[in-house]
């Protein structure tokens, strides 16, 4: 078994080495969720704003060109300096041969090298509890639910009714854009992005950094360079500030599938049905602007009953649970 450092974000050969394993991993443990395309993989492995991402692959031996699986780790450079987050994606065959444990131990070693004291790791429920969770003292912190919407099956008239102003939210106006946030909305958009900080995350401890204009423009430029198009639908309050939003990522090599990245409403504007209205309008916008789109996936903490209720009303179907565990990292 050999562990190799990889850079799928910049090196096409590294990406090609892990894509077959990622596709098989999805078939083994999340068969209802489409496998990621190469552009999504590249985006997944890019460094973030004041955040670093690293990837390693596990190979059967030094001559193998295709990996049995891969791990991706992320760590902040300014906040949460005790924490590293990780994902480990190994096929069922790789797990049987010990590839999963080899990757986990490599991730723990890297966390110790960086002086991180906590390692957070999520995995599909069909994989959990992985053998190393109990062996290395992992504790469950929270569970997310992956859900999928089939746009071909929705009632468009009902969606159009939900997207219209109601008695509770008639004072709000919907506005949408792709790519760069308009300058006149940028400052209040930062405020609604900060509203994500009070979403339920179980017992997981995380210091949400303030969203800044520098970070917003960094993310927008990175997406543009990668060829990724982001659809942003917002609700404007009567004073013209952003009260709520929905952000959807689309990848050019995945014409049928898109992914909801974030949905949030500023606390003082909650309770007006804005989440349902914004998400219904965003879905109709996608159908008009990107007619190839059929599937919309989303990811919600199981304690976020408010957004889960909105998703169920819209027709999202829960596919799998995704529990997360935390491990203490020794010196």
Image (cartoon, grey):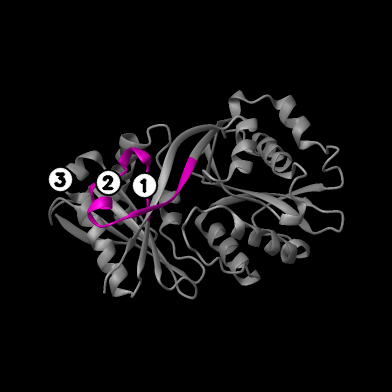
**Residue 214 found in image quarter:** bottom right
| SS at mark 3 in the image | loop
Circles 1 and 2: CB atoms closer than 8 Å: yes
Gap in angstroms between the C-alphas marked 3 and 2: 14 Å
**Residue 320 as seen in the image, left or right of residue 194:** left
- The location of residue 43, given as percent across then percent down, is 46, 55
| Dot 3 crowding, Cα within 10 Å, few <14, some 14–19, many 20+ | some
The residue lying at 50 percent from left, 64 percent from top is 206
**Residue 301 as seen in the image, left or right of residue 86:** right
- The location of residue 55, given as percent across then percent down, is 33, 60
Residue 72 vertical position relative to residue 166 in the rendered view, above or below: below
Quick one: quadrant of the N terminus? bottom left
- The location of residue 229, given as percent across then percent down, is 58, 50
Q: Which residue is mark 3?
A: 97
**Residue 24 found in image quarter:** top left
- Between 11 and 183, the one lying in front of the other is 183
Residue 168 visible in the displayed image:
yes
Disc 3 or 1, which lies upstream in sequence?
3
Disc 3 or 2, which lies upstream in sequence?
3
Q: Which residue is mark 1?
A: 123
Residue 37 visible in the displayed image:
no
Gap in angstroms between the C-alphas marked 1 and 2: 9 Å
Gap in angstroms between the C-alphas marked 3 and 1: 18 Å
Disc 1 or 2, which lies upstream in sequence?
1
- The location of residue 273, given as percent across then percent down, is 75, 41
| SS at mark 1 in the image | loop
Q: Which mark is residue 130?
A: 2
- Between 58 and 229, the one lying in front of the other is 58
Which stretch did the figure color magenta?
121-145
């Amino acid at each position: 078994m050999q562990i190799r450092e990889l850079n799928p974000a910049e090196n096409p050969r590294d990406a090609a080495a892990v894509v077959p394993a990622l596709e098989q991993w999805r078939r083994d443990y999340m068969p209802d969720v489409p496998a990621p395309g190469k552009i999504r993989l590249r985006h997944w492995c890019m460094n973030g704003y004041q955040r670093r991402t690293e990837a390693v692959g596990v190979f059967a031996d030094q001559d193998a060109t295709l990996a049995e699986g891969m791990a991706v780790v992320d760590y902040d450079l300014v906040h949460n300096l005790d924490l590293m987050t990780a994902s480990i994606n190994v096929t069922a065959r790789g797990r049987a041969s010990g590839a999963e444990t080899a990757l986990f131990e490599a991730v723990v070693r890297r966390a110790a090298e960086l002086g991180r004291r906590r390692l957070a790791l999520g995995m599909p429920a069909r994989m959990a509890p992985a053998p190393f969770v109990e062996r290395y003292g992992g504790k469950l912190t929270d569970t997310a639910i992956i859900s999928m919407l089939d746009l071909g099956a929705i009632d468009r008239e009902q969606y159009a009714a939900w997207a219209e102003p109601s008695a509770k939210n008639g004072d709000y106006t919907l506005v949408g854009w792709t790519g760069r946030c308009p300058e006149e909305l940028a400052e209040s958009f930062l405020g609604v992005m900060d509203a994500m900080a009070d979403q339920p995350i179980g017992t997981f401890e995380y210091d949400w950094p303030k969203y800044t204009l520098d970070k917003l423009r960094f993310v927008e430029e990175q997406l543009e360079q990668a060829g990724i198009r982001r659809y942003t639908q917002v609700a404007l309050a009567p004073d013209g500030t952003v009260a709520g939003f929905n952000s959807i990522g689309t990848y050019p090599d995945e014409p049928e599938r898109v992914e909801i990245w974030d949905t949030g409403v500023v606390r003082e504007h909650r309770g007006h049905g804005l989440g349902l209205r914004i998400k219904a309008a965003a879905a109709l916008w996608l159908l008009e602007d990107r007619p190839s789109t059929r599937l919309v996936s989303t990811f919600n903490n199981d304690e976020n009953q408010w957004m889960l209720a909105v998703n169920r009303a819209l027709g999202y179907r829960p596919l799998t649970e995704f529990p997360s565990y935390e491990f203490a990292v020794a010196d």
